[in-house]
Amino acid sequence: MERPLKRLLYFFAALFLALIVQLSYVQVYAAPDLKNHAANTRALDEQMRIERGVITAADGTVIAQNRQEGDYFLREYPLGDLTAPWLGYNSLRYGRSGVERAYNPELTGETDELTARSLLDILTDRPKRGADVQLTVDLAVQRAAVEGLGERKGAVVALDPRTGQVLAMASWPRYDPNELDERWGELNQNADRPLVNRALQGLYPPGSSFKPVVAAAALAEGLFTPESTFTDEGRYVAGGFPVNNYGGNTFGEHDLTTAMARSINTTFAKIGVALDEQLLAYTRAFGFEKELPLPLESAVSTLPEPSLIDTAHLAQIAFGQGQLLATPFQMALVASGIANGGRIMNPYLVEQVTDFHGAVVEQAQPSVWQTPVSPSVAGQVAEMMVQVVERGTGTQAALPGIRVAGKTGTAQVAEGGDHAWFIGFAPADDPRVAVAVLVENAGGGGSVAAPVARRVLEAGLAR
Amino acid sequence: MSPRNRELLFLLPAVLVTTIGFATIYIREAERLEWASLSYGGLFLGLFGLVHVAERFLAPKADPYLLPITALLSSLGIMMIYRLNPDLALQQALWLLVGLGVFVFVLIVARPLARLASYKYLLGLAGIGLLLFTVVFGREVYGARLWVRVAGIGFQPPEFAKLFLVVFFAAYLADVREMLAVSTRRILGIAFPPLKYLGPLLALWGLALALMIFLRDLGTSLLFFGALLALMYVATSRMLYVVVGTGLFAGGATVLYQIFPHVQRRVDVWLDPWADTQDAGYQIVQSLFALAEGGLTGRGLGQGFLVLPSGRTLIPALETDFIFSAIGEELGLAGAVGIVLLFFIFVWRGLRIALASSDDFVRLLAAGLTAIFGLQAFLILGGVIKLIPLTGITLPFVSYGGSSIVANFALLALLLRASHEAARQEEARLEAAVRGSATPGEVVVGPPAGGLRGLRTEGRGA
């Protein structure tokens, strides 16, 4: 029986050797891939043990704080769905989004600078804590945006055009991040996509709210002036495709300012055709086809494929149709660029980051993102936009005693009713707040979107 | 050095590991744990010390390495359980106490081991009875039906059944092995024993398939079949049994794979756990993540991501079937390979006892117990590291669970008893040789084990 016993021992030696080989493979060779696997929540778990920094609004109100449970710091959002979806969530099970994701290295104290600072804390055995993040969001403006939009699908964005500070961002439908874990399945499968921030991720034809870009390009190129006259016959054929005015109106003889105020499509189609390639260049200069300089999940506003662009398309683009797609945030940037003398500031959400000793580790510095047109051109366009609110399609955005500049948009879509748009800023002479409002399939921009914009502008000016 | 003193010396590393390990966890979780919890280490050591003393009386010549290995394995196990859930560790400590009691009890009762052989049919029936009991009253946990609840305490009858069946099979084979090894017919040049002697093999095969169908666990089935087949091979020295047996098992398993969805699911999850990381593949995928997190040297005791805020473990059954994943994460490849080597040394010492033994029954018993122990360790270790399909059996001495602890201490007692008897027989033989030979010098040269066997047969013939 010796031989079989020895063979049995060799057999077991082989089995255990196989175990060691497989162990080495899993723990060393395959380990990097396993650690980065999408289903691996361990890195997340580790960070859930760090006391995460709190997030505050511009006035210091806490909008994201911690609740300690055992070794874990779980997130609470005192304002519930008011700050969703851009604030995002921090879930052990479903990961992160929004500000919680974008500023996670700061909030967990894992940026290089914060790590260097916390070395001292490690040596003195103080528990590790993340840095606090103060946002630019003004809760009064945020409330105005959320309440103004109400329970209608759409988005509202408010910026300070002088600095690029994001004052408010609303999107509906949205969710309460405190209930995320319980309601994940339902939220994730909902056809209306409540987890998506429409302000940054929704792409819509901008319709006539795009006309300020066209006017700015025409003025900058010296093709027309605000006083240039046009004749509208209610119909204009470009490249074989007819262009009509909204509501089938005919305006006869008018100047460019009136074309803006009354949103005359035929005139802008003519300008678009006259601008030719330059229309596309200026559109890009206003930020289209560029990644938004904001660290949140966002979509890029797009022009049609270059090969598709012909005279007919140019005419359509000139009144914001023809496969031109923009996010509400992009349209707010257009408004802020006109407001700020042709300079679009880099938008930002975080005013400052302070480590838990109170020392400021990051402070936002306003900087220019795009300069599509000169201050004088921007001033002329702004003046035309004032006429929109004073005597044109945007009267419902008017505020007593304040000159409000704006532009309505009523974008036609393939399915469902028109999208209502309004972009604008106030006061027109020294703008402190710029806004973009989009309400999906809700009808005319002047009647639906302009009142929302007025409410947001009013709150923005009260700051 | 006498075997017992050597054993005492080798218990010291276990003392050290336990003390340092518990201290580490205590320091790490000081605010959550009571200071008194440090006494687990002391309690643990006192127990093994007592058992060591008992052994000095009951099996003084036994192998000195098996008890220290066991101590080290149970110490690592209870440490990890303590780190996962201090309440469970207290229960495990109580089970350890029972296990060591059973260990001493078996040492007393199984004296000499041959006594067991005379009860072989009773024991065999008890083994089958326990398995039947599991089939009838078993509750399904993670897809396998291995648990039974009696008076509120869950236990795993297969853990005990494995002991009874090994004792029965060893005794049975010791009686009939000569006949099984005989060949009377040659078919295609291969010598076959008479067909009726294939009976035991076919019975084994039937048992294995029945286990797979009714206990819904490929692992338990493979464990019993593999270990008892190894025993047949050792008894008869005939590879033919292994070849035919493996073929039969593979054929049966393939058919069952086609028929039974639970077998299919286990194998499919093993082949591709990534297809469903949230449900069917969750355990094994999380186990691999844990091992990867551990890397070469591990995250350190108490520093792995094993317990969720709710107090539940990240991997279900972490303290039982998946305890090795927890060890792999916190002690790394170094610790994991250490555990594998400890099991291998255990198997090596066990087979050495079989080799050294001159009595057929004792030799087969030692080989069978070692084979089933080693195979069980391999099946669950291989399962959690995705070398083979996952099974619902425990890691001997390390996993949380009363049945496993108690049954494996009984197994250890039988092995040590076999070792003691083997050593005593050899001593007796040497004395006889000294008495019978002209000069002591011839005996001092020391014949190898095979030679000793020759000596014995001569002695009997004389």
Image (cartoon, coloured by chain):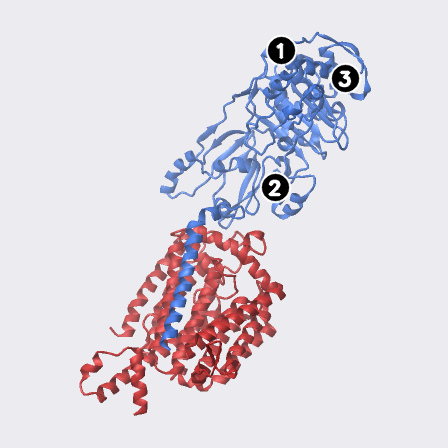
> Which chain is rendered red in the image?
B
- Quadrant in the rendering for residue A216: top right
User: Which residue is at the front of the view, B338 or A431?
Assistant: B338
**Residue closest to the far front:** B188
**Going from the N terminus, do you reach mark 2 or mark 3 first?**
2
| Protein chain holding label 3 | A
Measure the C-alpha gap from mark 3 to mark 1.
24 Å
Residue A139 lies, with reference to residue B213, above or below; the image says: above
Instruction: Give coordinates of residue A317: x percent, y percent.
Output: 69, 21
Marks 3/1 same chain:
yes
Measure the C-alpha gap from mark 2 to mark 3.
51 Å
Q: Mark 2 highlights which residue?
A: A177
Q: Amino acid at mark 1?
A: Glu
**Marks 3 & 1, CB-CB < 8 Å contact:** no
Measure the C-alpha gap from mark 1 to mark 2.
48 Å
Which image quadrant: the C terminus of chain B?
bottom left
The image's mark for residue A221 is: 1
| Protein chain holding label 2 | A
Which image quadrant: the N terminus of chain B?
bottom left
Q: Secondary structure at mark 2?
A: helix
User: Which residue is at the front of the view, B268 or B399?
Assistant: B268
The image's mark for residue A340 is: none
Instruction: Give coordinates of residue B368: x percent, y percent.
Output: 43, 75
Instruction: Give coordinates of residue A8: x percent, y percent.
Output: 40, 71
